[in-house]
Image (cartoon, rainbow, N blue to C red):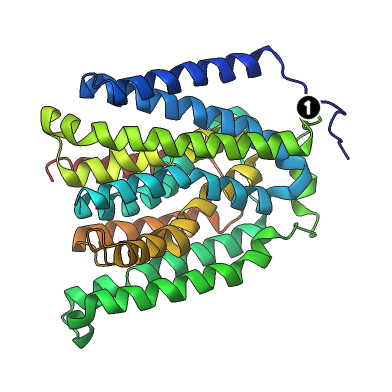
Amino acid sequence: MTTATAHPVLIRSDKLMLGGGAVLIVASGLAHYAGWASGLAFVLAAAAMSVLAAFVGLCVEQLGDRFGPGATGVLQSALGNLPELFICIFALRAGLVDVVRAALIGSILANLLLVLGLAFLVGGLRHGTQQLGSERARTIVVLMTLSVIAMTIPSLTHHLHTPAEQHEATFSVIVSIILLGLFALSLPFSLRRDTSGTSESVAPEKEAPRWPLFLAIGMLAVAGAAAAFVSDWFVAALEPSMESAGISEAFAGLVIVAIAGNAIENVVGIQLAAKGQSEYAFSVVLNSPIQIALVLAPLLVLISQVFGLASLTLVFSPLLVVVLVVSVLLAAMIALDGESTWLEGATLVALYAIIATAFWWG
Protein backbone atom coordinates (compact mmCIF):
# COMPACT_ATOMS: atom_id res chain seq x y z
CA MET A 1 0.00 0.00 0.00
CA THR A 2 1.30 3.45 -0.87
CA THR A 3 1.76 6.04 1.82
CA ALA A 4 1.98 9.80 1.71
CA THR A 5 5.26 11.59 2.28
CA ALA A 6 5.85 13.11 5.70
CA HIS A 7 5.77 16.66 4.40
CA PRO A 8 3.89 18.33 1.53
CA VAL A 9 5.77 18.20 -1.76
CA LEU A 10 4.78 20.85 -4.26
CA ILE A 11 6.59 20.19 -7.50
CA ARG A 12 7.07 22.77 -10.23
CA SER A 13 3.82 21.95 -12.06
CA ASP A 14 1.86 22.29 -8.81
CA LYS A 15 3.31 25.73 -8.20
CA LEU A 16 2.62 26.82 -11.79
CA MET A 17 -0.99 25.69 -11.48
CA LEU A 18 -1.41 27.50 -8.15
CA GLY A 19 0.19 30.69 -9.48
CA GLY A 20 -1.71 30.65 -12.77
CA GLY A 21 -4.99 29.99 -11.01
CA ALA A 22 -4.40 32.82 -8.55
CA VAL A 23 -3.63 35.26 -11.39
CA LEU A 24 -6.77 34.28 -13.32
CA ILE A 25 -8.97 34.51 -10.22
CA VAL A 26 -7.64 37.98 -9.41
CA ALA A 27 -8.09 39.08 -13.03
CA SER A 28 -11.63 37.72 -13.09
CA GLY A 29 -12.44 39.56 -9.87
CA LEU A 30 -11.04 42.80 -11.28
CA ALA A 31 -13.08 42.36 -14.46
CA HIS A 32 -16.22 41.88 -12.38
CA TYR A 33 -15.79 44.71 -9.89
CA ALA A 34 -14.12 47.19 -12.27
CA GLY A 35 -16.85 46.80 -14.88
CA TRP A 36 -14.74 45.49 -17.73
CA ALA A 37 -16.40 44.38 -20.98
CA SER A 38 -18.80 41.49 -20.35
CA GLY A 39 -17.17 39.31 -23.01
CA LEU A 40 -13.73 39.68 -21.44
CA ALA A 41 -15.14 39.13 -17.95
CA PHE A 42 -16.88 35.99 -19.18
CA VAL A 43 -13.72 34.57 -20.76
CA LEU A 44 -11.61 35.31 -17.68
CA ALA A 45 -14.14 33.67 -15.35
CA ALA A 46 -14.35 30.61 -17.59
CA ALA A 47 -10.55 30.36 -17.77
CA ALA A 48 -10.22 30.68 -14.00
CA MET A 49 -12.78 27.92 -13.51
CA SER A 50 -10.91 25.64 -15.91
CA VAL A 51 -7.64 26.05 -14.01
CA LEU A 52 -9.46 25.41 -10.74
CA ALA A 53 -10.90 22.25 -12.26
CA ALA A 54 -7.44 21.04 -13.22
CA PHE A 55 -6.17 21.77 -9.73
CA VAL A 56 -9.02 19.86 -8.14
CA GLY A 57 -8.13 16.97 -10.41
CA LEU A 58 -4.64 17.00 -8.92
CA CYS A 59 -6.11 17.01 -5.40
CA VAL A 60 -8.33 14.02 -6.21
CA GLU A 61 -5.31 12.16 -7.55
CA GLN A 62 -3.61 12.69 -4.18
CA LEU A 63 -6.69 11.29 -2.38
CA GLY A 64 -7.45 8.27 -4.58
CA ASP A 65 -5.44 5.56 -2.83
CA ARG A 66 -6.64 6.54 0.62
CA PHE A 67 -10.41 6.40 0.24
CA GLY A 68 -11.08 4.15 -2.75
CA PRO A 69 -13.12 5.08 -5.86
CA GLY A 70 -16.53 5.32 -4.17
CA ALA A 71 -15.68 7.84 -1.47
CA THR A 72 -13.42 9.77 -3.83
CA GLY A 73 -16.24 10.04 -6.37
CA VAL A 74 -18.71 11.32 -3.77
CA LEU A 75 -16.25 13.90 -2.43
CA GLN A 76 -15.25 14.99 -5.92
CA SER A 77 -18.84 15.32 -7.10
CA ALA A 78 -19.90 17.23 -4.00
CA LEU A 79 -17.16 19.84 -4.45
CA GLY A 80 -17.55 19.80 -8.22
CA ASN A 81 -21.23 20.70 -7.99
CA LEU A 82 -20.66 23.71 -5.72
CA PRO A 83 -20.03 26.13 -8.62
CA GLU A 84 -23.23 25.08 -10.34
CA LEU A 85 -25.20 25.44 -7.11
CA PHE A 86 -24.08 29.05 -6.80
CA ILE A 87 -24.53 29.74 -10.52
CA CYS A 88 -28.13 28.50 -10.31
CA ILE A 89 -28.87 30.47 -7.13
CA PHE A 90 -27.64 33.69 -8.74
CA ALA A 91 -29.61 32.88 -11.90
CA LEU A 92 -32.80 32.33 -9.87
CA ARG A 93 -32.21 35.64 -8.12
CA ALA A 94 -32.07 37.21 -11.59
CA GLY A 95 -35.30 35.44 -12.60
CA LEU A 96 -33.66 33.11 -15.13
CA VAL A 97 -35.73 30.05 -14.24
CA ASP A 98 -35.56 28.55 -17.73
CA VAL A 99 -31.76 28.81 -17.68
CA VAL A 100 -31.65 26.95 -14.36
CA ARG A 101 -33.99 24.19 -15.56
CA ALA A 102 -31.95 23.73 -18.74
CA ALA A 103 -28.71 23.84 -16.71
CA LEU A 104 -29.86 21.05 -14.39
CA ILE A 105 -30.74 18.77 -17.30
CA GLY A 106 -27.69 19.94 -19.24
CA SER A 107 -25.39 19.07 -16.34
CA ILE A 108 -26.67 15.51 -16.28
CA LEU A 109 -26.39 15.24 -20.07
CA ALA A 110 -22.89 16.74 -20.06
CA ASN A 111 -21.70 14.14 -17.55
CA LEU A 112 -23.54 11.15 -19.04
CA LEU A 113 -22.73 11.90 -22.66
CA LEU A 114 -19.92 14.41 -23.13
CA VAL A 115 -17.64 13.78 -20.15
CA LEU A 116 -18.26 10.03 -19.88
CA GLY A 117 -17.92 9.74 -23.66
CA LEU A 118 -14.63 11.65 -23.71
CA ALA A 119 -13.36 9.56 -20.79
CA PHE A 120 -14.22 6.35 -22.64
CA LEU A 121 -12.75 7.74 -25.88
CA VAL A 122 -9.47 8.98 -24.42
CA GLY A 123 -9.03 6.02 -22.09
CA GLY A 124 -9.91 3.54 -24.83
CA LEU A 125 -7.52 5.01 -27.37
CA ARG A 126 -4.66 5.02 -24.86
CA HIS A 127 -5.32 1.80 -22.95
CA GLY A 128 -7.76 -0.29 -24.99
CA THR A 129 -10.88 -1.77 -23.39
CA GLN A 130 -11.18 -0.43 -19.84
CA GLN A 131 -12.75 -2.14 -16.84
CA LEU A 132 -15.28 -0.21 -14.74
CA GLY A 133 -15.62 -2.57 -11.77
CA SER A 134 -18.66 -4.72 -12.53
CA GLU A 135 -20.43 -4.79 -9.14
CA ARG A 136 -19.97 -1.10 -8.40
CA ALA A 137 -20.73 -0.15 -12.00
CA ARG A 138 -24.07 -1.95 -11.95
CA THR A 139 -25.14 -0.39 -8.65
CA ILE A 140 -24.06 3.12 -9.62
CA VAL A 141 -25.87 2.87 -12.97
CA VAL A 142 -29.07 1.55 -11.38
CA LEU A 143 -29.05 4.28 -8.71
CA MET A 144 -28.35 6.92 -11.36
CA THR A 145 -31.18 5.69 -13.59
CA LEU A 146 -33.73 5.52 -10.77
CA SER A 147 -32.78 8.90 -9.31
CA VAL A 148 -32.82 10.75 -12.63
CA ILE A 149 -36.14 9.23 -13.69
CA ALA A 150 -37.62 10.02 -10.25
CA MET A 151 -36.67 13.65 -10.82
CA THR A 152 -38.78 13.71 -14.02
CA ILE A 153 -42.03 12.46 -12.42
CA PRO A 154 -43.35 16.01 -11.73
CA SER A 155 -42.81 16.79 -15.43
CA LEU A 156 -44.89 13.78 -16.43
CA THR A 157 -47.75 14.75 -14.10
CA HIS A 158 -47.72 18.22 -15.65
CA HIS A 159 -47.57 17.25 -19.31
CA LEU A 160 -50.10 14.41 -18.90
CA HIS A 161 -52.49 16.82 -17.11
CA THR A 162 -53.01 14.67 -14.04
CA PRO A 163 -54.66 16.12 -10.88
CA ALA A 164 -51.18 16.75 -9.45
CA GLU A 165 -50.67 19.40 -12.16
CA GLN A 166 -52.66 21.84 -10.03
CA HIS A 167 -50.18 21.42 -7.16
CA GLU A 168 -46.95 21.77 -9.10
CA ALA A 169 -44.95 23.68 -6.47
CA THR A 170 -46.11 21.54 -3.53
CA PHE A 171 -45.48 18.30 -5.40
CA SER A 172 -41.98 19.47 -6.39
CA VAL A 173 -41.17 20.26 -2.75
CA ILE A 174 -42.40 16.81 -1.62
CA VAL A 175 -40.41 15.05 -4.35
CA SER A 176 -37.33 17.12 -3.43
CA ILE A 177 -37.50 16.05 0.22
CA ILE A 178 -37.88 12.38 -0.80
CA LEU A 179 -34.90 12.62 -3.19
CA LEU A 180 -32.72 14.15 -0.46
CA GLY A 181 -33.70 11.28 1.83
CA LEU A 182 -32.79 8.78 -0.88
CA PHE A 183 -29.38 10.40 -1.21
CA ALA A 184 -28.78 9.99 2.53
CA LEU A 185 -29.70 6.30 2.23
CA SER A 186 -27.31 5.84 -0.71
CA LEU A 187 -24.26 7.19 1.11
CA PRO A 188 -23.24 3.97 2.93
CA PHE A 189 -22.86 2.10 -0.36
CA SER A 190 -21.14 5.00 -2.12
CA LEU A 191 -18.58 5.37 0.66
CA ARG A 192 -17.67 1.72 1.16
CA ARG A 193 -14.66 0.18 -0.53
CA ASP A 194 -15.06 -2.52 -3.17
CA THR A 195 -14.01 -5.75 -1.43
CA SER A 196 -14.67 -8.05 -4.37
CA GLY A 197 -11.08 -7.78 -5.53
CA THR A 198 -12.18 -7.20 -9.13
CA SER A 199 -11.08 -3.60 -9.32
CA GLU A 200 -7.78 -4.31 -7.58
CA SER A 201 -6.75 -6.74 -10.30
CA VAL A 202 -7.21 -4.24 -13.08
CA ALA A 203 -6.10 -1.09 -11.27
CA PRO A 204 -2.96 0.45 -12.77
CA GLU A 205 0.16 1.17 -10.76
CA LYS A 206 -0.07 4.63 -9.25
CA GLU A 207 2.71 6.70 -7.77
CA ALA A 208 2.58 7.35 -4.05
CA PRO A 209 0.63 10.48 -3.03
CA ARG A 210 3.01 13.38 -2.58
CA TRP A 211 0.68 15.34 -0.28
CA PRO A 212 -0.40 14.50 3.26
CA LEU A 213 -4.11 13.98 3.78
CA PHE A 214 -4.77 17.35 5.43
CA LEU A 215 -3.19 19.24 2.53
CA ALA A 216 -5.14 17.34 -0.14
CA ILE A 217 -8.47 17.91 1.64
CA GLY A 218 -7.61 21.52 2.43
CA MET A 219 -6.70 22.25 -1.16
CA LEU A 220 -9.96 20.66 -2.34
CA ALA A 221 -11.97 22.86 0.03
CA VAL A 222 -10.14 26.03 -1.00
CA ALA A 223 -10.54 25.23 -4.70
CA GLY A 224 -14.27 24.56 -4.21
CA ALA A 225 -14.77 27.87 -2.38
CA ALA A 226 -12.78 29.77 -5.02
CA ALA A 227 -14.87 28.16 -7.75
CA ALA A 228 -18.02 29.41 -6.02
CA PHE A 229 -16.78 33.01 -6.12
CA VAL A 230 -15.71 32.68 -9.74
CA SER A 231 -19.17 31.27 -10.53
CA ASP A 232 -20.75 34.47 -9.19
CA TRP A 233 -18.63 36.55 -11.54
CA PHE A 234 -19.33 34.11 -14.35
CA VAL A 235 -23.12 34.41 -14.10
CA ALA A 236 -22.88 38.21 -13.80
CA ALA A 237 -21.20 38.29 -17.21
CA LEU A 238 -23.46 35.62 -18.68
CA GLU A 239 -26.61 37.68 -19.30
CA PRO A 240 -24.96 40.53 -21.27
CA SER A 241 -22.84 37.98 -23.14
CA MET A 242 -26.00 36.06 -24.11
CA GLU A 243 -27.63 39.22 -25.41
CA SER A 244 -24.60 40.36 -27.41
CA ALA A 245 -24.02 36.90 -28.94
CA GLY A 246 -27.71 36.15 -29.56
CA ILE A 247 -27.65 32.92 -27.53
CA SER A 248 -30.99 31.53 -26.32
CA GLU A 249 -31.67 30.82 -22.63
CA ALA A 250 -32.21 27.12 -23.37
CA PHE A 251 -28.84 26.71 -25.10
CA ALA A 252 -27.05 28.86 -22.51
CA GLY A 253 -28.38 26.71 -19.69
CA LEU A 254 -28.11 23.34 -21.39
CA VAL A 255 -24.57 23.79 -22.74
CA ILE A 256 -22.68 26.85 -21.48
CA VAL A 257 -23.77 26.94 -17.84
CA ALA A 258 -23.85 23.14 -17.57
CA ILE A 259 -20.31 22.67 -18.88
CA ALA A 260 -18.89 25.62 -16.94
CA GLY A 261 -20.64 24.60 -13.73
CA ASN A 262 -19.30 21.07 -14.05
CA ALA A 263 -15.84 22.05 -15.20
CA ILE A 264 -14.26 20.11 -12.35
CA GLU A 265 -15.80 16.76 -13.36
CA ASN A 266 -15.20 17.56 -17.03
CA VAL A 267 -11.46 17.76 -16.47
CA VAL A 268 -11.03 15.21 -13.68
CA GLY A 269 -12.94 12.35 -15.28
CA ILE A 270 -10.98 12.65 -18.53
CA GLN A 271 -7.66 13.02 -16.69
CA LEU A 272 -8.28 9.86 -14.68
CA ALA A 273 -9.34 7.87 -17.75
CA ALA A 274 -6.26 9.04 -19.67
CA LYS A 275 -4.08 7.70 -16.86
CA GLY A 276 -5.79 4.32 -17.00
CA GLN A 277 -7.72 4.81 -13.76
CA SER A 278 -11.03 3.90 -15.38
CA GLU A 279 -12.89 2.89 -12.22
CA TYR A 280 -12.07 6.18 -10.53
CA ALA A 281 -13.09 8.09 -13.66
CA PHE A 282 -16.39 6.21 -13.91
CA SER A 283 -17.18 6.83 -10.23
CA VAL A 284 -16.33 10.54 -10.41
CA VAL A 285 -18.33 11.15 -13.59
CA LEU A 286 -21.47 9.19 -12.66
CA ASN A 287 -21.61 10.39 -9.07
CA SER A 288 -22.21 13.88 -10.43
CA PRO A 289 -25.57 13.20 -12.19
CA ILE A 290 -26.66 11.19 -9.13
CA GLN A 291 -25.92 14.16 -6.90
CA ILE A 292 -27.58 16.58 -9.33
CA ALA A 293 -30.79 14.51 -9.29
CA LEU A 294 -30.75 13.67 -5.57
CA VAL A 295 -29.17 16.80 -4.08
CA LEU A 296 -28.62 19.79 -6.37
CA ALA A 297 -32.05 19.96 -8.02
CA PRO A 298 -33.99 19.30 -4.77
CA LEU A 299 -31.89 21.85 -2.88
CA LEU A 300 -32.53 24.51 -5.51
CA VAL A 301 -36.28 23.82 -5.37
CA LEU A 302 -36.28 24.23 -1.58
CA ILE A 303 -33.96 27.27 -1.64
CA SER A 304 -36.15 29.02 -4.21
CA GLN A 305 -39.19 28.54 -1.98
CA VAL A 306 -37.56 29.36 1.37
CA PHE A 307 -35.57 32.42 0.31
CA GLY A 308 -38.16 33.94 -2.00
CA LEU A 309 -36.22 33.58 -5.24
CA ALA A 310 -37.92 32.95 -8.58
CA SER A 311 -39.95 29.78 -7.98
CA LEU A 312 -38.28 26.66 -9.34
CA THR A 313 -40.21 23.42 -9.80
CA LEU A 314 -39.19 20.04 -11.18
CA VAL A 315 -41.29 20.54 -14.31
CA PHE A 316 -39.15 20.47 -17.43
CA SER A 317 -40.10 20.85 -21.08
CA PRO A 318 -41.10 17.68 -22.98
CA LEU A 319 -37.94 17.74 -25.12
CA LEU A 320 -35.70 18.05 -22.05
CA VAL A 321 -37.45 15.08 -20.42
CA VAL A 322 -37.16 12.92 -23.55
CA VAL A 323 -33.46 13.59 -24.18
CA LEU A 324 -32.72 13.04 -20.49
CA VAL A 325 -34.42 9.65 -20.31
CA VAL A 326 -32.88 8.50 -23.61
CA SER A 327 -29.41 9.57 -22.47
CA VAL A 328 -29.72 7.80 -19.11
CA LEU A 329 -30.86 4.57 -20.73
CA LEU A 330 -28.08 4.71 -23.35
CA ALA A 331 -25.38 5.34 -20.73
CA ALA A 332 -26.79 2.48 -18.65
CA MET A 333 -26.75 0.06 -21.58
CA ILE A 334 -23.13 0.89 -22.35
CA ALA A 335 -21.89 0.74 -18.76
CA LEU A 336 -23.75 -2.28 -17.39
CA ASP A 337 -21.31 -4.76 -18.95
CA GLY A 338 -18.59 -3.38 -16.68
CA GLU A 339 -16.21 -2.25 -19.42
CA SER A 340 -15.87 0.55 -21.96
CA THR A 341 -14.37 1.05 -25.43
CA TRP A 342 -13.35 4.14 -27.38
CA LEU A 343 -16.15 3.60 -29.92
CA GLU A 344 -18.80 3.67 -27.19
CA GLY A 345 -17.27 6.92 -26.01
CA ALA A 346 -17.44 8.40 -29.50
CA THR A 347 -21.12 7.42 -29.72
CA LEU A 348 -21.93 9.23 -26.47
CA VAL A 349 -20.10 12.38 -27.62
CA ALA A 350 -21.93 12.31 -30.96
CA LEU A 351 -25.30 12.06 -29.23
CA TYR A 352 -24.41 15.03 -27.01
CA ALA A 353 -23.50 17.12 -30.06
CA ILE A 354 -26.83 16.30 -31.71
CA ILE A 355 -28.85 17.21 -28.58
CA ALA A 356 -26.91 20.46 -28.09
CA THR A 357 -27.57 21.42 -31.70
CA ALA A 358 -31.29 20.76 -31.25
CA PHE A 359 -31.39 23.47 -28.55
CA TRP A 360 -29.31 26.07 -30.43
CA TRP A 361 -32.43 27.82 -31.67
CA GLY A 362 -34.08 27.85 -28.26
Write down the quadrant of residue 318 in the picture.
Answer: bottom left
Relative placement, left or right, of 353 versus 11 is left
Identify the residue at image location x=78%, y=31%.
Answer: 209
Which type of secondary structure does the marked residue at label 1 adopt?
loop
- Residue type indicated by callout 1: Arg
Relative placement, left or right, of 354 versus 222 is left
Relative placement, left or right, of 21 versus 329 is right
Q: Position of residue 329 (x, y in %)?
A: 41, 61
Front-most of 91 and 53? 91
Identify the residue at image location x=53%, y=61%.
Answer: 141
Classify the position of the N terminus by image quarter: top right
Where 259 sits versus 148, above or below? above
Identify the residue at image location x=26%, y=45%.
Answer: 253
Q: Which residue is mark 1?
A: 210
- The number of callouts visible is 1
Write down the quadrant of residue 312 in the picture.
Answer: bottom left
Q: Position of residue 81 (x, y in %)?
A: 47, 47
* Residue 273 seen in the current view: no
Front-most of 194 and 329? 194
Front-most of 260 and 15? 15
Where 241 sits versus 135, above or below? above
Identify the residue at image location x=63%, y=65%.
Answer: 187
Where 27 sits versus 264, above or below? above
Q: Position of residue 57 (x, y in %)?
A: 59, 33
